[in-house]
């Protein structure tokens, strides 16, 4: 069993609106997969279900052998999530935010200190470690948010729009961080930036109106849609003109 | 362990908001000084320190509702709580984490209130310790109201209800500022269905050494505290499932 994530016919509704419909997808261990789609495609809902924030109405998802339906607490112990918004405790310092997440994931004081020191170095957070989170710029808050997702030593990492609202330099820096994580853990990333998906991911899954339209490498998706540019391939798939091209 | 880690974070959030802290402790003390000054000029039975201090101590605790409602509703409005929901924390870790830091705060408020009263005219007896301990179940009521409102309402709504509205209502219905009988029998009967007057009478009974008067008021207060705290757990759990 080499799948880190196995989504089985998962459906999630909000009232009458179907946010995710009959989604099935397998993600291998150590793989980085980008989830692409227009607004309302169901990307964030998929992450919410996989991270145990809400239950699927139908189907199931198995993360490293644990079901989100029946073993949600065990699932939560194995994952790290960096939400779309800046999810930091505003009155806590950078160090305190990291320590909070480390301790909640079960690390003791010594382990937390060591892990935080490593992450501070990787993300250059040591220069701002005593600053309250609310005083950080958007770019620093993003770094902190991703570091907070990593501090619990997750085996699966969910990054929901990690570079949203960042300038190009900050975005490129984050790309480097994310690339450095490849192979060490399974990463599911949602993004609106097509070049980000193309540059970072092993495979790309395209969603439209809650359904999975296609899965494959950027090259495969271009071939499937007979497009030269990935952007054209995405538009074709996301607008429903690429039907029948599911991987 | 997770409860204490989360409680540590909540404590830091409270201590780093000194304005509400100073207001919660300072305002009741100012009232105590003011009413004691009135008492020394125009003696009023209700404003004798033995009668007034338990009432002001309970009034001070009403600010705990504001603190707890703000804490929870602010957390809910941001993405931080969503992040915390993706950790292995369960509902009881959250609720206990919110409640634990507020208990020493309630005791501190009570201690300061009684200490100020001792500096005025209140005589020290061992009953004073019982009166302060009796504030614990009362704190449960106010923390429960705050957690419930914070779990169900927006920050603005929760702040309005647990701020001006609750502090005033609980003051009027507590029998601290005026005798409930003076308003009328209906008003008194209504007030006695709520926990606020029982909370004040509990403190008065403990302070005066009337131990036979304690159980009935303690039952009302502890009952309300248990119901409100349980309701807040369910309300918070429903947030986690949304």
Image (spheres, coloured by chain):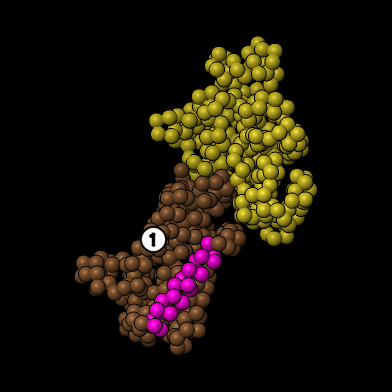
Chain colours: A yellow, B brown
In this view, A131 is above or below B141: above
Quadrant, the N terminus of chain A: top right
Residue A197 appears left or right of B39: right
Residue at 62% x, 38% y is A158
Rendering coords of residue A11 (x, y %): 47, 31
Rendering coords of residue A8 (x, y %): 53, 32
Quadrant, the C terminus of chain A: top right
Which one is in front, B92 or B141?
B141
Q: Residue furthest top?
A: A226
Rendering coords of residue A19 (x, y %): 48, 30
Residue under mark 1: which chain is it in?
B
In this view, A178 is above or below A88: above
Residue A105 visible in the displayed image: no
Count the marks. Answer: 1
Q: Secondary structure at mark 1?
A: helix
Residue at 69% x, 28% y is A196
In this view, B205 is above or below A238: below
Residue at 59% x, 24% y is A206
Rendering coords of residue B159 (x, y %): 45, 54
Question: Magenta stretch containing residue B30, yes or no?
Answer: yes
In this view, A193 is above or below B235: above
Q: Quadrant of residue A5?
A: top right
Callout 1: 10 Å neighbours few (<14), some, many (20+)?
many
Residue A73 appears left or right of B134: right
Residue B17 visible in the displayed image: yes
Q: Residue furthest front?
A: B41
Q: Residue furthest left?
A: B185
Residue A66 appears left or right of A186: left
Residue at 68% x, 59% y is A108
Give the magenta part as a residue range: B20-41
Question: Magenta stretch containing residue B78, yes or no?
Answer: no
Circle 1 residue: B166
């Amino acid at each position: 069993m080499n799948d880190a994530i196995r989504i089985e016919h998962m459906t999630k509704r909000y009232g009458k609106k179907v946010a995710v419909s009959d989604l099935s997808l397998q993600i291998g261990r150590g793989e980085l997969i980008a989830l692409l789609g227009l607004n309302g495609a169901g990307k964030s809902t998929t992450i919410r279900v996989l991270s145990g924030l809400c239950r699927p109405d139908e189907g199931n998802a198995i993360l490293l052998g644990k079901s989100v339906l029946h073993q949600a607490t065990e699932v939560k112990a194995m994952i790290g999530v960096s939400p779309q918004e800046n999810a930091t405790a505003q009155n806590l310092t950078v160090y305190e935010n990291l320590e909070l997440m480390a301790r909640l994931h079960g690390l003791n004081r010594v382990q937390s200190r060591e892990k935080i020191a490593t992450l501070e170095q990787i993300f250059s957070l040591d220069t701002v470690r005593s600053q309250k989170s609310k005083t950080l710029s958007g770019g620093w808050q993003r770094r902190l948010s991703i570091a907070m997702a990593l501090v619990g030593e997750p085996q699966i990492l969910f990054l929901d729009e990690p570079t949203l609202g960042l300038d190009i330099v900050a975005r490129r820096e984050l790309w480097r961080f994310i690339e450095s994580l490849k192979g060490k853990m399974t990463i599911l990333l949602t993004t609106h930036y097509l070049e980000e998906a193309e540059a970072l991911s092993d495979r790309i899954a395209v969603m439209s109106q809650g359904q999975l339209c296609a899965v494959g490498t950027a090259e495969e998706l271009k071939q499937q849609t007979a497009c030269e540019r990935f952007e054209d391939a995405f538009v074709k798939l996301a607008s429903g003109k690429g039907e029948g091209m599911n991987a | 362990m997770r409860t204490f880690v989360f409680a540590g974070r909540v404590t830091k959030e409270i201590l780093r908001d000194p304005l509400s802290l100073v207001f919660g402790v300072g305002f009741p003390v100012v009232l105590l000084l003011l009413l004691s000054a009135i008492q020394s000029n125009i003696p009023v039975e209700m404003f004798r320190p033995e009668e007034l201090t338990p009432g002001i101590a309970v009034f001070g605790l009403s600010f705990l509702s504001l603190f707890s409602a703000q804490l929870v509703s602010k957390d809910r409005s941001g993405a931080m709580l969503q992040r915390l929901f993706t950790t292995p924390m369960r509902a009881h870790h959250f609720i206990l984490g919110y409640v634990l830091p507020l208990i020493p705060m309630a005791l501190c408020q009570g201690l300061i209130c009684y200490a100020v009263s001792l500096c005025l005219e209140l005589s020290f007896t061992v009953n004073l310790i019982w009166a302060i301990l009796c504030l614990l179940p009362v704190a449960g009521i106010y923390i429960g109201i705050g957690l419930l409102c914070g779990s169900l309402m927006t920050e603005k709504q929760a702040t309005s209800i647990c701020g001006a509205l609750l502090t005033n209502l609980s003051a009027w219905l507590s029998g601290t500022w005026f005798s409930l009988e003076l308003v009328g029998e209906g008003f008194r009967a209504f007030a006695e269905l709520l926990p606020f007057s029982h909370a004040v009478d509990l403190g008065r009974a403990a302070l005066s050494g009337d131990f036979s008067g304690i159980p009935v008021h303690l039952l009302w207060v502890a009952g309300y505290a248990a119901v409100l705290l349980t309701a807040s757990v369910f309300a918070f759990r429903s947030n986690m499932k949304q």
